[in-house]
Each structure stands twice: as structure tokens, then as C-alpha cells.
Amino acid sequence: MKGNSMRANVLIIEDEPAIAELVAVHLKHAGMHPISAPDAAAATSLIAEVLPDAIVLDWMLPGMSGMQFMRELKAGDRTRVVPVVMLTARAAEQHKVDGLEAGADDYVTKPFLPKELVARIRALLRRHAPQLTDDVVTVGGLTLNPTTCRVFVKEKGVDAPVQLGPTEFRLLHFLMTHPERVHSRAQILDRVWGDHVFIEERTIDVHVKRLRAALKLVEYDGIIETVRGCGYRLTALSVPRRLEDAA
Ligand code: CA
């Protein structure tokens, strides 16, 4: 989680400050950005502002239980995409089954090894939010390397670079790691900006325009499609055929 990639926001919902702090320290050490909430109500207001990339959720919470809150998260259009790790002292097999059936993506029982918890969160992020990892991604001849912050297309065996600003880079990274799907402007704000309240949706159009202008220099502007009334889609189907022609 280095380079130009975003730091993963991980929301810790835990009423025991010592445990919340322990988890937060290990997440920070792993290059992630922890945010803590002592109960479901506090978590709800945090999520309303910034959609986290993953959630660590304690089962036994004052007020709404972690289990109930997870059902709410998994029923919400905006929140159901966020992976949840249940963290609880309830080690009984039936509780694990209940948690997983209610939609938990993983389950860790107290006492736990913080390193194991971090490893599990990493694995979930790799699956759910590949734009937060440093894996090199290639779509239809266009390659993005998060570690070197470079984007290029192979042209007759030579790498033709694409020069991008940091926001366009993150936007392209997100779209390339989630190709062939339409993303609404609100979803892009949540996933790329991490914020859907304080930034106007029109801001995205400005950055898409800049991104296309940069890609046009290598004739790849067509890779990003505008889907009317829906949003944007990155598709390998519309990339230039000339690469194959030349081969
Ligand atoms: Ca608790």
C-alpha cells in the first residue's frame, strides 16, 4: 500500500478503547488509515461522510449489536460493498456460522493476534478494493504500475508513457481494477475520493475529461465510455486494434 495508491480507510467499531487502539496501531503500521467508532450510531455518522474500504466490527456493542448493524450494512445500497470482519469473543462455532450467514466477510475471535487480523483485512482489500494495492494492472494494452506511478502502452515493443496528475492516476487505477462495469458518479466519489458529501459530482467529469485528454495522445481515450444517465465504464472492447495489426 505505497506508491500513488490511496491508503485504505478501515473503520473499527469497538466499544473497548484498549482493543480499538491495539487494532488501530497495527493498521497504521501496515500503511492503512484507521478510524474508530464506539458504537453503531457513531459509525453510521462516520460512514455517511466517508465510505470506509473495510470494517472491523465488534459483536457485543452498547446499543445496536454488531450483528444487527452488519445486517443494516449488508442491506444498504451504498454500504453492502464494504467488506466486514467480525471481531468477537464469541468463539462458539454456531456464532461463526451466524456471523458469516448474516454477511460477514471474515471472522476473528478474541483473543486475537493483531497481525492475523491485519493479514485478513489485507486479503479482503485485495479482493474488494484492488485499487488500494500495488499490483500492476493491464487492460487491453494499457498498463498501470502503482509502485512506479507510471502508465504506458506497449507500441512496437516500446513503452509509450501516459502523463497523468495524481487524481487522474487514482481514477484510472480504480477504473482499470474494475473494468467492464458502469460506475455512477456517486460510486466513483466514494471509491476514488473516499468522500461523497463534500465533493460535487461534476468534479468527476472534469477529471475524466483530463484523463481522456492524456489518453488521447496514445489513442486510448476511447477506453473510457460515458454511459448516459449512469456514469462511466472502462472497457477493453473499445481499445485501438492497431496493436494487433502491428503484431
Ligand atoms: Ca464489545
Image: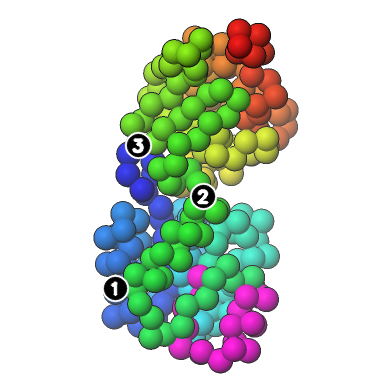
Residue 24 seen from this side:
yes
Mark toward the start of the polypeptide (3 vs 2): 2
Secondary element at image label 2? loop
Badge 3: how crowded within 10 Å, few (<14), some, or many (20+)?
A: some
The magenta span reads: 85-102
In the rendered image, which quarter is residue 139 located in? top right
Mark toward the start of the polypeptide (1 vs 2): 1
Label 2 C-beta lies within 8 Å of the nearest ligand 1 atom = no
Q: Is residue 95 magenta?
A: yes
Badge 2: how crowded within 10 Å, few (<14), some, or many (20+)?
A: many
Along the line of sight, the residue nearer the viewer: 216 or 206:
216
**Could you tell whether 15 is left or right of 184 in the image?**
left
Give the foreground label among 1 and 3: 3
Give the residue at mark 3.
147
Q: Residue at x 46, y 66 (%)?
A: 120
Give the foreground label among 3 and 2: 3
Q: Residue at x 38, y 86 (%)?
A: 111
On residue 21, the disc is: 1
